[in-house]
Amino acid sequence: MTDHPVSVPSTPSSASVPGSVTTPAPVPDSGRLAGKTALVTGAAAGIGRGVAARFAAEGARVVFSDRDGAGAEAAAAESENSRGIALDISDEASVSGAFTDLAASGWTPDVVVANAGVQLFGHDAKVADLDLDVWRRTIDINLTGTFLTVKHAVRAMLAAGGGSIILTGSPTGLNGEGADFTAYSSSKAGIHGLARTVAAAYAGENIRVNTVVPAYTETPLVSAITSDPEARAAIIGRIPLGRAGSPADIEGIMVYLASDDGAFATGALFAVDGGMTTL
Ligand SMILES: NC(=O)c1ccc[n+]([C@@H]2O[C@H](COP(=O)([O-])OP(=O)(O)OC[C@H]3O[C@@H](n4cnc5c(N)ncnc54)[C@H](O)[C@@H]3O)[C@@H](O)[C@H]2O)c1
């Protein structure tokens, strides 16, 4: 079994996501993240790649990380002050080793975006039809991998005096949107709870933790939907603003939470979903 049963090309940049009707206009670099160092997981493609590139454009030093190390390096090469590393969030040695290496080279992150995830289209299912192996694979990466990322981010931030951690959630963890995807939806609900719990535990240590909830966003993750006109129309029909999201739609809220503008935000969930979770 692969994580992406449907073979697709990686998304080259947030500005060229196919099928998006109206994506935000490029935002001039504001320097809002000048002086910060950020680590983004799942940054070889999709939302993570777009967010990491935007962070760099806003003045941060950025570590693009992904289990696809070559993809992370290629993505990082397109941005200033960035580096790409291999990091598998489901492997604690890989996660802790990355934080150790970053500290040794003076790149301890002030901002960590725990974004990497999978959705096993063609395997994930309603609960009566769900194989234990598919459940475990999804939870191992999405929930346990996010836990490991957050655990080592918190350790690094405790040593450094604080920071901002941002998790990528999902409407499927909030409403019935994920009825056919039990494992994925459960992993995302777990991520929402993890963020609240860690935020409460470490607010006194100047560590903020928040969750961003995108809607259906046209990245390689959801190519099974994007390539099926009927399925695509159906999901867009459940987005009140009437279009699919793109990684560019998510970048602004991530910049806010990473920056000092977000200094009073913690333990919160920010839906930037075209209204999807209002239904
Ligand atoms: N695309 C959507 O519609 C949508 C909607 C809501 C939430 N999300 C969430 O947004 C996040 C990013 O999704 P995307 O659409 O950009 O997906 P994507 O498939 O385009 O990119 C995900 C990246 O994560 C990497 N990855 C997968 N497993 C990993 C692991 N074990 N360790 C490190 N990297 C790993 C992949 O190699 C890939 O580069 C995910 O958490 C996803 O659940 C996506």
Image (spheres, grey):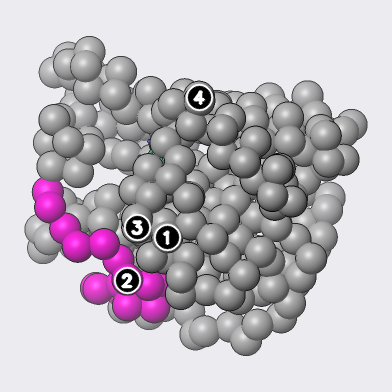
Task: Establish if 161 lies above or below 214.
Answer: above
Residue at the spot x=52%, y=84% of the render?
A: 26
Can residue 279 be seen here? The reply is no
Q: Quote the CA–CA distance across marks 3 and 1.
A: 5 Å
Q: Which residue corresponds to the image point at 77% horizontal and 38% vertical from the top-left?
A: 157
- Amino acid found under the numbered disc labelled 4: Glu
Q: CA distance from mark 4 to mark 1?
A: 21 Å
Dot 4 falls on a residue whose secondary structure is helix
- Tell which of 45 and 24 is nearer to you: 45
Q: Which residues are magenta?
A: 6-20
Distance (Cα) linking label 3 and label 2: 10 Å
Residue bearing mark 3: 71
Whole-percent x, y for residue 269 in the image: 62, 44
CA separation in Å, label 2 and label 1: 13 Å
Which numbered disc, 2 or 1, marks the residue that appears first in the sequence?
Answer: 2
Residue hosting label 1: 73
Task: Identify the residue under disc 2.
Answer: 12
Query: Do callouts 3 and 1 mark residues in contact (Cβ within 8 Å)?
Result: yes
Q: Nearer the viewer, mark 3 or mark 2?
A: 3
Residue drawn at point x = 32 percent, y = 39 percent: 118
* Mark 4 vs 1, N-terminal side: 1
Kindly identify the residue that appears in the image at 54 percent across and 42 percent down: 114
Q: Are marks 3 and 2 in contact (CB under 8 Å)?
A: no
Mark nearer the N terminus (2 vs 4): 2
How would you classify the magenta stretch by its main secondary structure? loop
User: Residue type at mark 1?
Assistant: Glu
Answer with mark 4 or mark 3, whichever residue precedes in sequence.
3
The residue pinned by badge 4 equals 92
The amino acid type found where label 2 is placed reads Pro
